[in-house]
Amino acid sequence: MTELVLIGIGAGHPDQITLEAVDALQRVDVFFVVDKGPERHDLSQFREAVCRRHRPDEGYRTVRLPDPERDRHPADYGAAVRDWHQRRAELLAAAVHAELASDGVGAFLVWGDPALFDSTLRVATDVALQVPGLEIVVVPGISSIQALTARHRIPLNRIGRPVQITTGRRLAAGEVPEGCDLVVMLDGAAAFMTLPDLDHIYWGAYLGTTSEMLIEGVVADVRDDIIRARADARERHGWIMDTYLIRRNDQLGGASRV
Ligand SMILES: C[S@@+](CC[C@H](N)C(=O)[O-])C[C@H]1O[C@@H](n2cnc3c(N)ncnc32)[C@H](O)[C@@H]1O
């Protein structure tokens, strides 16, 4: 049986990798890597460090796959993403055929947890439809959300209260559910600037890495600090990865802190 294993490797801290992930890493014949351009250089260095640490035998191959072109501002966002995933799936299916023996193990090292804002699992499921006998295995990882709440030493949810995980794009569009705290990811445009003054924000960038940054406070007090921190960080690194939790200052919750 051929296996394709999606291994969650945590959000940047080399020790935030599970024993299950370490076991899986040791069985891999071929690591598949999707080339995502220069801004992802730090992320690919982290993946290489994970391999060096847990596979000192070097008894594996790395196969690089090009990332198909993608329209970043399509009229129909959902259709454009589905089309992009399909083209990725075709490339990967061809690579699995070409590179893996019938009892071979291929793997993707997936940032954070494979179930959270990552297309690899969707693409792998499509590949399994195209490659008879291919089994998909998922190894969970520590997500950036877990890294964020741990670093700020807060629970994800208030007692008996819901939390919605959303994107900067949706927050900026004002799609904010009533009575629900928020985790915001993939925010390229500082969507927290649209939040009411009295909400409480727990912000973290490059969580788990040596460049980790944390800011916490009432939105009105800290939003300019976050804007400055983001601009500095972008200048230093050329890219930024940040996540934040918003405790809404609504009537249901009363005080907006933990
Ligand atoms: C494509 S999603 C991948 C999420 C990942 N699967 C996870 O479990 O965290 C990328 C987004 O995750 C968040 N993220 C990932 N790693 C992070 C880190 N080390 N620090 C802060 N945010 C991070 C950012 O919001 C980033 O825009």
Image: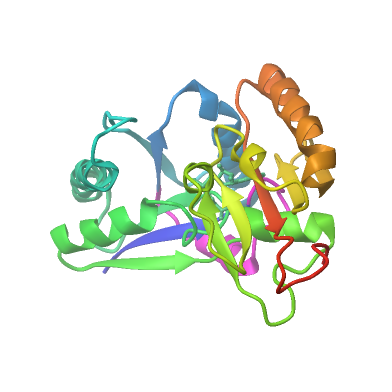
In the picture provided, is 235 more to the left or to the right than 28?
Answer: right
Q: Residue at x 73, y 54 (%)?
A: 148
Residue 213: percent from left, percent from top: 79, 38
The quarter of the rendered structure image containing the N terminus is: bottom left
Q: 207 or 98: nearer the eye? A: 207
Q: On screen, 169 above or below 19? A: above
Q: 117 or 230: nearer the eye? A: 230
**One can see residue 26 in this view:** no
Residue 38: percent from left, percent from top: 50, 21
How many numbered circles are shown? Answer: 0
Which residue of the protein is positioned furthest toward the bottom in this rendering?
160
Q: Residue at x 33, y 66 (%)?
A: 136
Residue 21 shown in magenta: yes
Residue 177: percent from left, percent from top: 53, 63
Residue 217: percent from left, percent from top: 84, 48
**One can see residue 78 in this view:** yes
Q: Residue at x 28, y 44 (%)?
A: 81
Q: On screen, 170 above or below 26? A: above
Q: On screen, 113 above or below 211? A: below
Residue 153 shown in magenta: no
Q: 209 or 203: nearer the eye? A: 203
Q: Which residues are magenta?
A: 11-30
